[in-house]
């Protein structure tokens, strides 16, 4: 008879099994393997696996358009390295570009158009049709005459093929103005070009031709003209390509100032005085004075500024000013101003002084450093007479803009929100931003339409700022854009059509780029340069624009021919007007005393790639959070004597107050800095995941709100917080 | 009697657990799949065709380990069958002639968060291939590819033995084995060296 298993025996069996299990690998292996399973299960996002490939591309986050080499796995970029733009140029890129491939996945990336909800900061998604209708309504109101305030288009990266369409749109909207964000490197050149007769199409700077450069706050060795241009200068300082003397005039101990052959530590705002004094010294050479005509004749320059006057304004000695003039006179020299990414423009009138100095230096003479250059060919469907002329933001009356459209906000160079705010009408209708991210200017916008991020659409890199010749590079589309992303050109065409505005041509941004390539092919000029140094096919051998586009997307660069002055002679510079001279005269006077309540001067500065309105890849947070390689936003740099006078210790939390507001920061003492000046780093806030942080605490808004003479600086006071 | 029965039950339970844990667990835990081609290292190695490990598994100019060679490497010699084995003929027909990559199952796949540079260990430290890969190069057939159903990793290179006691590097490489070898060799290590 079968014996029934008792409960006791069952329990004993179970107990034995448990005890035995402990002496087997079962529990220990399961613990280990389940832990690993939690990492490898399909529920956990994993790195992509696949073939490792490389592609040529160009970073389009700023006008420099550095050439890059992407490493991809299964078609996804995982590494960005700088590449040479041609066989001669050294590879270079800024920190923003180095990690730019992360930006498509930034936490603030938008995936659908977002409209502001009420007056607050909250937003809700809207569909594309609603966004188009909102813009179309505003545009049609102006076409019909119901609304009369201005429509302004702020183009953060002018010179692209799409920029031409934006000008065409503004030309067809009553009250429309096209406002290009002028790269800081181009401001001096634009002033100079406006004074030349005959005026060339554009001007560029051939740094390779210079034997001496006098920089007025220009980050010559830190990104002026783009990282590749700075890399060329650095190579020359290391002995490649002929001797180069760098003289840097600025109040701050920047990287360029410390590595220059001579650092002229001038007072903030005294750049014009120094430039005019050097010009005056040079003008005493009869061979040079004739270049400036009446402006230099009869002691006109001496009436503006002599070495003695400049010494009082700048704080330099007369001897050092004369020695500087002698160094510049000895070779092919050029004076370059501005370009600090967070420092804003030079004081009004300084560009005129630099223009006069450059003419006297012979920078425009044949073989000189400043050269004429042609503009890039226009897309064929758009004609010059159909386009709105470029306007300057500072020339727009305050409170006159009812509709502001912003494309490609400046990511490398700061454009404070305060400046845009001033131009907007109090009863503003619409601010629309084409931005992949809800950051910077996009946070001002009533409607943000996500444009494709870098590598999500074919983009072009037109001529970099101050480049000596026109060029064009293309960057490929490698990543899928989110479904809600909109090509700005397509969006604007739809809005224009709904508003009854007839825009010439058809197609999206890629179509306009194709038209530009076609125009280049038709112009039959210039040459193609391959990245690798291998000779690409000659331009004439390309049978179609499509074939040329393919070559450009593969990494080849198109460069225009070098231009010379017509008839081999430099154009004459028109004599400065009375208004110009009055302004210059005011610039050379010693600076006005600051008010007693605000005895210090707050001046911003920034670094290429990290001062703009764009997002910062979290990877780069290391640069300004964990190291001293970049000055973090919310730090104030000052001379220890100034700190002591204010009762502030090095490293202490401080409060800076101006008439317009206050700012909390950390004090950093540096004995090399000019006493009496607070140098505020305009960069990512280390406490805000790299983003600029709340508006009220941004140093740029304070500097701009209190600025005079067009420069970003404000009287301030300082104490420990 | 009752006590004896009860003790017997306990022992039976323990024995069952021991049997399951030692004998049945591996069968349940690991899948078994053959390699797509029964490649004979012995036939290609020093005592066969006279090839060295680095002829197929070398380190490139940029320092990257080339890993398992592609079918193009096989095609250099096996455009046509050289011997008379059916397996070689299948290699030529199904892969070489068709230009199809052989879908090898990789024994030594490490987790994504592990960075293992062959160049450092082979060229800098001078380790022989056999140190970590044992007698793999002498086999006449590839070892069975057994994959842990839970983790997805191959048994051969990581956990030949379920008991990680007194096992050498060639018996499977988990982090403890690597660290022990580093310690024995006097190599200082930090987290970032292997987990970049």
Image (cartoon, coloured by chain):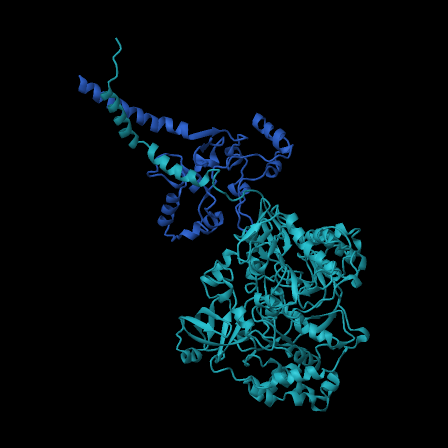
Chain colours: A cyan, B blue
| Residue A718 on image: x %, y % | 44, 75
Q: How many marks?
A: 0
Seen at 40% across and 51% down, the residue is B191
The foreground one among B180 and A437 is A437
| Residue A216 on image: x %, y % | 60, 76
Residue A701 placement: quadrant: bottom right
Looking at the image, residue B16 lies above or below residue B46? above
| Residue A643 on image: x %, y % | 42, 77
- Residue A207 appears anywhere in the view: no
Give the quarter of the figure containing the N terminus of chain A: top left
Residue B5 placement: quadrant: top left
- Residue A696 appears anywhere in the view: yes
The foreground one among A536 and A543 is A543
Looking at the image, residue B190 lies above or below residue A335? above
Residue A571 placement: quadrant: bottom right
The foreground one among A333 and A405 is A405
Looking at the image, residue A714 lies above or below residue A458? below
| Residue A391 on image: x %, y % | 70, 68
Is A459 displayed left or right of B130 in the figure? right
Is A86 displayed left or right of A684 in the figure? right
Is A528 displayed left or right of B97 in the figure? right
């Amino acid at each position: 008879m079968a014996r029934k298993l008792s409960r006791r025996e069952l329990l004993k069996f179970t107990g034995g099994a448990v005890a035995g299990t402990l002496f087997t690998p079962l529990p220990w292996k399961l613990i280990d393997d389940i832990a690993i399973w939690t990492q490898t299960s399909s529920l956990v996002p994993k790195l992509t696996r696949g073939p490792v490939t490389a592609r040529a591309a160009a970073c389009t986050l700023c006008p420099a358009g550095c050439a890059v080499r992407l490493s991809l796995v299964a078609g996804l970029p995982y590494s960005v390295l700088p590449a040479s733009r041609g066989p001669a140029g050294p590879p270079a890129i800024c920190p923003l570009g180095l990690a730019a491939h992360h930006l498509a996945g930034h936490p603030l990336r938008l995936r659908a158009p977002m409209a502001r909800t009420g007056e607050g900061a909250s937003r809700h998604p809207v569909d594309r049709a609603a966004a188009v209708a909102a813009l179309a309504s505003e545009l049609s109101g102006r076409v019909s005459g119901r609304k009369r305030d201005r429509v302004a288009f702020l183009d953060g990266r002018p010179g692209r093929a799409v920029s031409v369409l934006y000008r065409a749109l503004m030309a067809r909207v009553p009250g429309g103005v096209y406002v290009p964000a002028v790269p800081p490197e181009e401001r001096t050149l634009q002033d100079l070009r406006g004074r030349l007769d005959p005026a060339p199409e554009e001007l560029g700077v051939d740094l390779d031709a210079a034997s001496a450069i006098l920089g007025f706050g220009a980050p010559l060795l830190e990104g002026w003209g783009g990282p590749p241009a700075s890399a060329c200068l650095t190579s020359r300082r290391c002995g490649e390509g002929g001797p180069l003397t760098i003289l840097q005039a600025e109040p701050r101990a920047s990287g360029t100032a410390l590595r220059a052959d001579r650092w002229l530590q001038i007072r903030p705002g005294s750049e014009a005085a120094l430039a005019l004094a050097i010009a005056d010294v040079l003008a005493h050479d009869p061979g040079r004075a004739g270049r400036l005509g009446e402006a230099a004749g009869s002691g006109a320059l001496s009436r503006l500024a002599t070495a003695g006057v400049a010494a009082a304004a700048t704080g330099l000695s007369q001897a050092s000013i004369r020695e500087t003039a002698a160094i510049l006179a000895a070779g092919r020299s050029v004076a370059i101003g501005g370009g600090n990414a967070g420092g804003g423009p030079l004081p009004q009138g300084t560009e005129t002084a630099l223009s006069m100095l450059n003419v006297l230096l012979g920078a425009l003479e044949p073989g000189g450093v400043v050269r004429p250059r042609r503009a890039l060919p226009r897309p064929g469907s758009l004609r010059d007479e159909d386009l709105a002329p470029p306007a300057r933001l500072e020339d727009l009356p305050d409170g006159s803009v009812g509709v502001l459209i912003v494309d490609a906000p400046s990511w490398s160079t700061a454009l404070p929100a305060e400046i845009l705010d001033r131009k907007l009408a109090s009863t503003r209708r619409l601010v629309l931003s084409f931005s992949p991210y809800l950051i910077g200017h996009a946070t001002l916008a009533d409607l943000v339409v996500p444009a494709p991020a870098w590598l999500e659409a074919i983009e072009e890199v037109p001529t970099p700022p101050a480049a000596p010749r026109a060029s064009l590079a293309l960057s490929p589309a490698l990543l899928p854009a989110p479904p809600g992303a909109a090509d700005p050109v397509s969006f604007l065409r739809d809005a224009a059509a709904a508003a009854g505005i007839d825009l010439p041509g058809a197609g999206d941004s890629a179509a306009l780029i194709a038209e530009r390539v076609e125009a280049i092919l038709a112009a039959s000029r210039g040459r193609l340069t391959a990245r690798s140094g291998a000779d690409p096919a000659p331009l004439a051998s390309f049978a179609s624009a499509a074939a040329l586009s393919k070559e450009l997307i593969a990494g080849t660069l198109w460069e225009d021919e070098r231009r010379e002055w017509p008839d081999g002679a430099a154009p004459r510079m028109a004599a400065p007007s009375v208004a110009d001279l009055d302004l210059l005269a005011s610039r050379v006077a010693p600076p006005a005393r600051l008010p007693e309540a605000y005895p210090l001067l707050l001046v911003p500065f920034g670094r290429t790639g990290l001062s703009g309105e764009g997002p910062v890849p979290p990877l780069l947070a290391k640069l300004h959070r964990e190291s001293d390689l970049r000055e973090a936003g919310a730090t104030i740099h000052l001379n220890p004597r100034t700190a002591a006078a204010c009762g502030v210790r090095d490293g202490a939390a401080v409060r800076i107050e101006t008439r317009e507001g206050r700012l909390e920061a950390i004090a950093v003492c540096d004995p090399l800095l000019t006493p009496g000046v607070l140098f505020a780093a305009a960069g990512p806030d280390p406490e805000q995941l790299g983003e600029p942080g709340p508006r009220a605490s941004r140093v740029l808004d304070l500097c701009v709100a209190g600025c005079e003479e067009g420069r970003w600086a404000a009287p301030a006071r300082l104490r420990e917080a | 009697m009752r006590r004896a029965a009860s003790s017997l039950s306990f022992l039976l339970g323990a024995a069952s657990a021991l049997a399951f844990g030692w004998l049945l667990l591996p069968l349940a835990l690991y899948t078994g799949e053959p390699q797509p081609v029964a490649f004979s290292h012995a036939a290609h190695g020093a005592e066969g065709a006279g090839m060295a490990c680095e002829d197929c598994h070398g380190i490139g100019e940029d320092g990257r380990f080339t890993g398992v060679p592609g079918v193009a490497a096989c095609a250099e010699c096996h455009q046509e069958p050289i011997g008379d084995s059916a397996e070689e003929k299948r290699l030529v027909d199904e892969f070489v002639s068709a230009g199809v990559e052989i879908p090898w199952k990789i024994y030594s796949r490490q987790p994504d968060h592990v960075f293992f540079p062959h160049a450092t260990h082979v060229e800098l430290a001078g380790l022989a291939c056999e140190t970590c890969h044992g007698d793999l190069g002498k086999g006449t057939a590839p070892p069975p590819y057994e994959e842990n159903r839970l983790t997805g990793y191959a048994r051969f290179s990581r956990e030949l033995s379920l008991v990680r006691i007194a096992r050498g590097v060639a018996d499977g490489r988990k982090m403890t084995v690597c660290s022990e070898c580093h310690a024995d060799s006097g190599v200082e290590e930090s987290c970032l060296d292997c987990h970049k």
